[in-house]
Image (cartoon, rainbow, N blue to C red):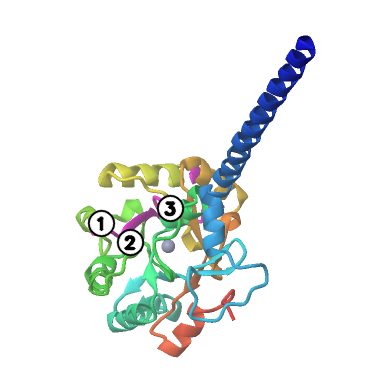
Amino acid sequence: MLKRLLIALLILVTGTAALIYGRNFLVQTAPIKDSALTATIKLPDIKIFQRTVAPEGTKLKMPIDAGIFNAGTLWVPVIVYHHIGTAPSNLSSADQSMFIKPEWFEKHVKYLKDNGFETIHFSDLDIYFNKGTPLPVKRPVIISFDDGNGTGYTKAFPILQKYGMTGTYFVITNYVGHGSHLTWDQIKEMGAAGMEIGSHTLSHPFLTKSLRLKEELVQSKKILEDNLGVTISTFAYPYGIYDEKTVALAKEAGYTTARSFTTGNGISTGNLFEIPVVRIYANIGLDRWNKQLFASGKPE
Ligand SMILES: [Zn+2]
């Protein structure tokens, strides 16, 4: 009898212990599993995805926020200017079209400001797409200047500062300090004031025909970095001409973005080395400028 009682007691104790252990096991494992899932969901890239990407096929109306119009694509007008000033009358009409009067440039910048655009840099695109960091602004625009003309400092820079905007200056390093081009002091001053500096090669060649392709990419970057003491991460192809080899070497040289001359404004991980642009020619009116700004790829 006592033996039976002892066996029954043993079964009861063992059973209770097993039940408690089992419960604990369940109680303990469930949260671990949940937190593991939560941790996965909270990865930075997923956060970005939730924050900015609209469902496939979503049509957004202007004004838009976050610069997104389709899954994985960021809508950013990248504007290109060359000379800010009055074109000399002896130039060809094609060359004259590369000039825009300062008062028109100011109208453009003011328009952007009045419509809620904020300037970002090409490096922000790298950080956004490759490192998963949200863009610092809701309605991004990039204002870029090609060739390192001095008017980028004397005319454009004060206007950008007046409206709290920044620009990206693509410099041809062999030309710095020569003729009407920017000087190193001017470039340094603009860099210190928050402007982005990019490379536009050593000598502005047709890169696909250049015998010094690698040098144009690598050396121009190094010269800028040695003179400015900052990392140069963006590049603009002269004349917008490039091929697969150029892109591969630009990546190898350490750039993280490169700007083309293709018209458009949808940027994704697939075209960070072929970033499309909105080209600005001559002193066009705001109505035409607006149409160009919202050209191909615009949200409807
Ligand atoms: Zn150029």
Establish if 287 lies above or below 232. below
- Pointer 3 or 1: first along the chain: 1
Mark 3 or 2, which is nearer the eye?
Answer: 3
Q: Residue at x 51, y 47 (%)?
A: 250
Secondary structure under tag 2 reads: loop
User: The residue tagged with tag 1: helix, strand or loop?
Assistant: helix
Tag 2 residue:
148
| Residue marked by disc 3 | 234
Tell me the amino acid under the disc marked 3.
Thr
The secondary structure type at the circle numbered 3 is strand
Is the shortest distance between ligand 1 and the CB of mark 2 under 8 Å? no
Q: Quadrant of the C terminus?
A: bottom right
Which numbered mark, 1 or 2, is in the foreground of this view? Answer: 1
Quadrant of the picture in which ligand 1 is shown: bottom left
Measuring from the top left, give residue 128's x and y in whole percent.
Answer: 48, 55
- Amino acid of disc 2: Gly
Q: Residues within 10 Å of mark 1 (few under 14, many from 20)?
A: many
For this orientation, the residue located farthest to the top is 3
Q: Are marks 1 and 2 in contact (CB under 8 Å)?
A: yes
Q: Are marks 3 and 1 in contact (CB under 8 Å)?
A: no
Residue 274 appears anywhere in the view: no
Considering only vertical position in the picture, is 2 above or below 95? above
Query: Which segment is the magenta one?
Result: 193-214
15 or 194: nearer the viewer: 15
Whole-percent x, y for residue 296 in the image: 58, 76
Q: Which residue position holds label 1?
A: 187
Q: Residues within 10 Å of mark 3 (few under 14, many from 20)?
A: many
Whether residue 224 is visible, yes or no, is yes
The label nearer to you, 3 versus 1, is 3
Judging depth in this view, the residue of 77 and 45 nearest the camera is 45
